[in-house]
Image (spheres, rainbow, N blue to C red):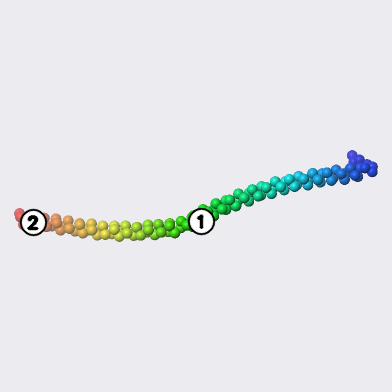
Amino acid sequence: EEPRGPGAERSWKSKVRRILAEESQLTCRTLGTLEQQVDGRTLQLRVTVAQLNTKIGRLLQEIPRRLEAARSLERTKLELTLVQQELQRQESKLMDCRASLSKERLRWSVLKG
């Protein structure tokens, strides 16, 4: 039940003002808290971005070294292939020499015979 009379309107306005003031303070505190959270998160993100930039910088510096290592590996593979081919040629020559030696031994054994 609402109070009536000359002081009732002043009392009602006073209550409304008090409620609005409390709401305003609560809103300001909430906004302040949110601003602090946003500032904290912004700082965290800036630190993270700085760390990522540092890592990216290191990786960019490593690229030429890794490219050279990859080129060197390719050269080594090519050299290994060439050495394997030469080894196969030498093995083939060795097999031919062994066959010739066997023929010569057989011929000598027949001549000695």
Disc 1 is placed on an element classified as helix
Residue drawn at (51%, 56%), measured in percent from left and top?
A: 57
Instruction: State the image coordinates of residue 31 (x, y, percent, origin top left).
Output: 72, 48
Q: Work out which quarter of the rendered image holds the N terminus and state it.
A: top right
Extreme-left residue of the structure: 113
Residue 46 horizontal side relative to residue 58, left or right: right
In the image, residue 89 lies at what x, y percent?
24, 59
| In-front residue for pair 30/100 | 30
* 79 relative position to 24: left or right: left
> Which residue of the protein is positioned furthest toward the right in this rendering?
5
Give residue 15's position: percent from left, percent from top.
85, 43
**N-term-proximal mark, 2 vs 1:** 1
Left or right of 58 on screen, residue 100: left
Q: Which residue is mark 1?
A: 57
Q: CA distance from mark 2 to mark 1?
A: 76 Å
Residue annotated with mark 2: 108
Query: As shown in the figure, which amino acid type bears the numbered disc 2?
Result: Trp
Question: Which residue: 63% across, 51% down?
Answer: 42
